[in-house]
Image (spheres, grey):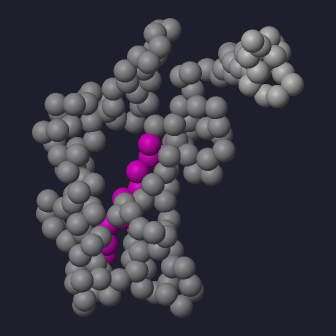
Amino acid sequence: MILTLVPGRRACLHALILLFYLIFYGFLTALFTLTMWVMLQTVDPNIPKYQDRLSIPGMMIRPKTDALDITYNMTHTENWEDYVKKLNIFLADYNDSRQAANNELCVPGRYFVQPDNGVLNHPKRACQFNRTMLGNCSGLVDSTYGYREGRPCILVKMNRVINFFAGANKTMNITCAAKKFSFSSKVRVCHS
């Protein structure tokens, strides 16, 4: 008796069809794997490929908002309490004791370049940035970060971007300005 799964086909024909699809999908898998391997040979695992597409590399402002606008009413504390809470959470990692325990003491005004000496995933150390360096904006002197007096502290943070040296060894300048000309009299002095 001949085993037939589909009327008119024998078992050996089913075996040939199965063998064809195994070889076909095996070839597609090998082709995909080879293509991925060749593509990955062109990418350096230690440097992000598209780091040049950032408009402002690694720059952030704190307190973090949905937009880059920070607006509030001084007389209504509920308008700015959220900003103060966000700054407290953000600056907790910059307490002097945590910075001394986890980060290197670096020379001010010079970049802290750390070569990896050809070792993949060589851990990098960060320079100490103590909260007390922020003066009145540290939250230690004024717990409201100036929001109560109408002189809010807005922090600009620069993250590490590979092969990017902020200001080309010069001090960076930041200018505060009102979004509309009619508000320009209400904007206070901005320090960078």
Which residue sits at x=41%, y=16%?
122
**Residue 76: x percent and y percent?**
25, 89
Image quadrant occupied by the C terminus: bottom left
Image quadrant occupied by the N terminus: top right
Quarter of the figure with residue 21: top right
Q: Which residues are magenta?
A: 151-159
| Tally of marks | 0
Which residue sits at x=63%, y=51%?
55
Which residue sits at x=27%, y=72%?
82
Was residue 77 drawn as part of the magenta stretch in this picture?
no
Q: Residue 111, relative to residue 157: is it above or below?
A: above
**Residue 188: x percent and y percent?**
39, 77
Q: Residue 118, relative to residue 138: is it above or below?
A: above
Q: Residue furthest front?
A: 1
Q: Residue 56, relative to residue 183: is it above or below?
A: above
Q: Residue 59, relative to residue 10: is it above or below?
A: below
Of residues 160 and 135, the one drawn nearer to the viewer in this rendering = 160
Which residue sits at x=54%, y=91%?
182
**Residue 67: x percent and y percent?**
49, 70
Q: Is residue 178 visible?
A: yes
